[in-house]
């Protein structure tokens, strides 16, 4: 029997659980198979030798978290149309690891101009007196990680991040650059775009990095051999969108 869809046909999943190795993953999603529109949020529990599978209380708390994320901060993106159930879950897991992550950007009501002031690095955007400061050892790190994040929604952006950080305490220094694609949300950055934006992000990391500390649950993702860095990427994007003085936090104060 052939299936047919209308523009309003929606597949809905709530509290869909899957286990991958030591990870218990809960996902909420809405998917429109005709257009490929996908809205989702997820939460991950990592089991360890001392922290095994979730009990009923833990399951309830994780389901509450994913429901709140889906309501307040969902990821909204276009994927392939007419995906099977397995294909849809594979797409969501890929996006969690290599795309927007487990949740969308924090929404706020600021009326400031949304700009990262690409033309100048001379303005001091952050007050050192009131901001977290990483240890001197973090500044001396040589290894730099490069990460990309696609922020969907009404104002889609590609976000390029360079960072160095310490897995022992979660200290991170980062610089970022943002590419807006409002006129064409399906635009795929060229190699030239990618190189230029990472060059800008690297310049900001060297000259005026943002200082932050990632969550203790995810600081292990700063290790050289980390399997992925999806959660720390999402936390850095959250930090970018907290804004300071009306500007996105793509850079800190010039030293």
Image (cartoon, rainbow, N blue to C red):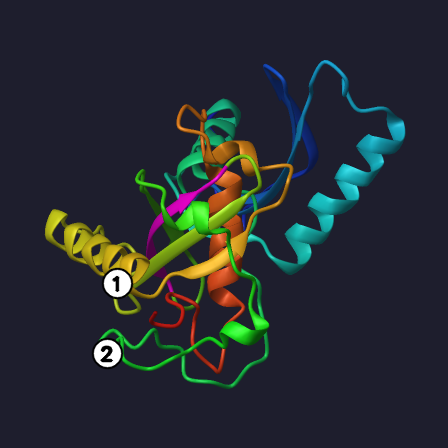
Q: Observer-nearest residue: 35 or 7? A: 35
**131 versus 76 height, above or below:** below
Residue 200 is left or right of residue 49, and the answer is: left
The residue carrying pointer 1 sits among few (fewer than 14), some (14 to 19) or many (20 or more) residues within 10 Å by Cα, namely few
Q: Is residue 41 above or below residue 76?
A: above
- Which-is-in-front pick, marks 1 and 2? 2
Labels 1 & 2 near each other (Cβ < 8 A): no
Foreground of the two, 142 or 194: 142
Decide: few, some or many residues near mark 2? Use Cα within 10 Å; few <14, some 14-19, many ≥20.
few
Q: Name the dominant secondary structure of the magenta segment.
A: strand
Quadrant the C terminus occupies: bottom left
Q: Sequence-wise, which precedes: disc 1 or disc 2? A: 2
The secondary element bearing badge 1 is classed as loop
Q: State the image quarter where residue 123 is shown.
A: bottom left
Toward the right, the furthest residue is 57
Question: Residue 140 bears which disc, if any?
Answer: none
Instruction: Tell me if I can see residue 143 in this picture.
Output: yes
Separation (CA) of disc 1 from disc 2: 26 Å
x and y, in percent, of residue 139 in the image: 39, 50
Task: Residue 6: tell me if it is visible.
Answer: no
Depicted 163 relative to depicted 255: above or below:
above
Mark 1 lies on residue: 184
Instruction: Name the spot of residue 228 as percent of width and height, x first.
Output: 45, 30
Q: Which residues are magenta?
A: 156-166
Q: Residue, x 25% and y 73% (percent of image)? A: 118
Q: Secondary structure at mark 2?
A: loop
Instruction: Give me the disc on residue 120.
Output: 2
Query: Is residue 149 covered in magenta?
Result: no
Q: Which residue appears farthest toward the left when viewing the image?
A: 192
Q: Position of residue 130 (x, y in %)?
A: 58, 73
Given residues 78 and 149, the one toward you in this image is: 149
């Amino acid at each position: 029997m052939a299936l047919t869809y209308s523009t309003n046909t929606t597949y809905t999943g709530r509290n869909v659980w899957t286990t991958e190795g030591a990870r218990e993953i809960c996902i909420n999603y809405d998917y429109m198979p005709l257009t490929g529109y996908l809205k989702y949020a997820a939460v991950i529990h990592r089991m360890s030798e001392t922290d095994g599978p979730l009990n009923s209380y833990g399951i309830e708390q994780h389901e509450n978290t994913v429901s709140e994320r889906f309501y307040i901060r969902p990821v909204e993106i276009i994927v392939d149309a007419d995906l099977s159930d397995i294909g849809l879950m594979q797409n969501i897991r890929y996006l969690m690891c290599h795309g927007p992550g487990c949740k969308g950007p924090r929404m706020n009501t600021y009326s400031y101009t949304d700009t990262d002031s690409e033309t100048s690095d001379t303005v001091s955007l952050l007050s050192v007196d009131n901001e977290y400061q990483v240890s001197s050892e973090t500044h001396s790190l040589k290894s730099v990680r490069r990460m990309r994040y696609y922020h969907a929604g009404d104002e889609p952006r590609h976000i390029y991040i360079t960072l160095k950080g310490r897995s022992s305490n979660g200290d991170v220094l980062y610089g970022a650059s943002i590419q807006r694609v409002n006129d064409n949300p399906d635009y795929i950055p060229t190699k030239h775009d990618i190189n230029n934006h990472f060059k800008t992000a690297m310049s900001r990391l060297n000259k005026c990095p943002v200082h932050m500390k990632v969550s203790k649950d995810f600081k292990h993702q700063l290790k050289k051999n980390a399997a992925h860095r999806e959660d720390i990427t999402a936390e850095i994007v959250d930090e970018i969108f907290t804004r300071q003085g009306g500007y996105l936090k793509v850079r800190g104060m010039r030293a």
